[in-house]
Image: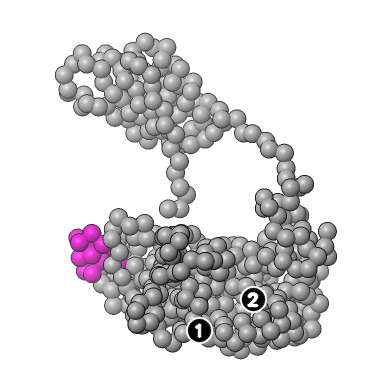
Amino acid sequence: MADALKVGIAGLGTVGASLVRIIQNRANELATTCGRAIEITAVTARDRSRDRGIDISGITWFDTPERLAAEADIDVFVELIGGASGAAADSVKAALTRGLHVVTANKALLAASGVELARIAEEKSVLLNFEAAVAGGIPVIKALRESLTGNTVSRVYGIMNGTCNYILTRMEKEGLSFADCLKEAQRLGYAEADPAFDIEGNDTAHKLAILTTLAFGTQIAADEIYLEGITNISIEDIHAAADLGYRIKLLGVAQLTDSGIEQRVHPTMVPHDSVIAQVDGVTNAVAIESDILGELLMVGPGAGGDATASAVLGDIADIAKSSPGAQRVPVLGTPAASLAPYKRARMQSHEGGYFIRLTVADRTGVFASIAACMAENGISLESIMQRPKPDAATDTPKTIILVTHATTEDSVRKAVDAIKAENYLVGEPQVIRIERPKAF
Ligand SMILES: NC(=O)c1ccc[n+]([C@@H]2O[C@H](COP(=O)([O-])OP(=O)(O)OC[C@H]3O[C@@H](n4cnc5c(N)ncnc54)[C@H](OP(=O)(O)O)[C@@H]3O)[C@@H](O)[C@H]2O)c1
């Protein structure tokens, strides 16, 4: 195995602390998938004495990010401080100039100085990775930079600010005013004490500027973006949009036109039945339209310590796998020799909801018998209905449809067998498993 990849982390706040915890807790898995260990050897933040809920006792502490970047014994400098200038900008520049790989989640820095930083990285033949800077955990940078190679992109757009999407969703679902929803977002920690940067669209604009460059191969032009935030959206607008079959989302859109590139961030009406219209709360979504692939839509967590750290870790792992002496990306994700033996879970222990359709003879007591068979097997029902309606002509077989709460395959099979034994079924029962997405 190649030597450990030595990582220095500047910034131990929401994202930095999550990253330290994940790297420490998953050391063995990371070493296996990356072909070398990932070791945090240096850290820095403003306040050394602050309890961050992580163990940094064996890690060298540096008093400033600039000193860490210049002096630490590291291969990768991870910047999780934030801000377009100051410590974040100075330390990233110092690290690249020193010939270190850099990983950052800092959209403000990239929107302001991305081209300059890219130039230094290329001159020094090091990587500058920034997956977490746009749409948090959604791997949109990798999609544009690597997966869509050869495609000509015509449009990129998306919901890239969780605060705005949370406010618009609450306004629509609960009929609350913009001001009330903003207060609630602040109470829940979804919005900053000074929310202007989010609600006026600047945060989305920074992310859009980065996507535009990746999509169209042009200079980063964050100052050229048409910008409108959501502060003027009223509940009347939301109701009127709903009446017309639309929902209002704050979108960032970058589009190739005959006269140049259109970059805009503004409240946008999206058709109610489109997938992007269904993206609610703090969730993000990014769509990419390109000539070979067609349309790609990625939906996922756009913020939060762990989701963002997940993207940062992916960037670090890419560096580990691409360094000289390291093994390249394993063909199957894990090196073939380290793949664990497959262990099959019994289908009978599968847990989930079930749709069960029964055709039954029209007899009294059938409904009660079915309910009893379910209860005896510990199955709780979400709904039970009869088709046609109970008052339809008698003596014809009736259809009874059951939808269960989460239960096991074993219980459902036993319940269905018990129902079959009652001799009122006409034909075979139909059982269809329900798969419920967690978030969307
Ligand atoms: N949070 C998210 O969900 C999210 C999502 C996507 C991208 N990001 C990006 O990730 C980066 C970090 O965000 P975050 O939410 O983790 O921020 P945060 O919680 O405010 O943490 C910032 C960290 O930087 C340290 N810091 C600030 N100024 C410093 C200085 N001059 N010298 C040394 N350390 C300094 C702070 O030190 P102290 O702890 O000692 O104060 C803190 O540990 C930002 O670029 C942000 O835009 C965040």
Question: Mark 2: which secondary structure?
Answer: strand
- Lateral position of residue 385 relative to residue 45, left or right: left
Give the camera-side residue of 300 and 162: 300
The residue wearing badge 1 is: 219
Q: Which circle, 1 or 2, is nearer the viewer?
A: 1
**Can residue 77 be seen from the camera position used here?**
no
Q: Residue at 40% of width from left, 17% of height from top?
A: 419
Q: Decide: few, some or many residues near mark 2? Use Cα within 10 Å; few <14, some 14-19, many ≥20.
A: many
Q: Decide: few, some or many residues near mark 1? Use Cα within 10 Å; few <14, some 14-19, many ≥20.
A: few
| Residue 334 locus on image (x, y percent) | 70, 51
**Looking at the image, is 215 positioned above or below residue 246?**
below
Question: Mark 1: which secondary structure?
Answer: loop
- Lateral position of residue 89 relative to residue 264, left or right: right
In the figure, residue 316 lies in which quadrant? bottom right
Placement of the N terminus among the 4 image quadrants = bottom right
Q: Is residue 50 magenta?
A: no
In the figure, residue 322 lies in which quadrant? bottom right
Q: Residue at 62% of width from left, 73% of height from top?
A: 129
Q: Is residue 247 magenta?
A: yes
* First along the sequence among labels 1 and 2: 2
| Residue 246 locus on image (x, y percent) | 26, 62
Q: Amino acid at mark 1?
A: Gln
- Lateral position of residue 288 relative to residue 48, left or right: left
Q: Amino acid at mark 2?
A: Leu
Magenta stretch bounds: 236-248
| Residue 411 locus on image (x, y percent) | 50, 25
**Can residue 292 be seen from the camera position used here?**
yes
Mark carried by residue 128: 2
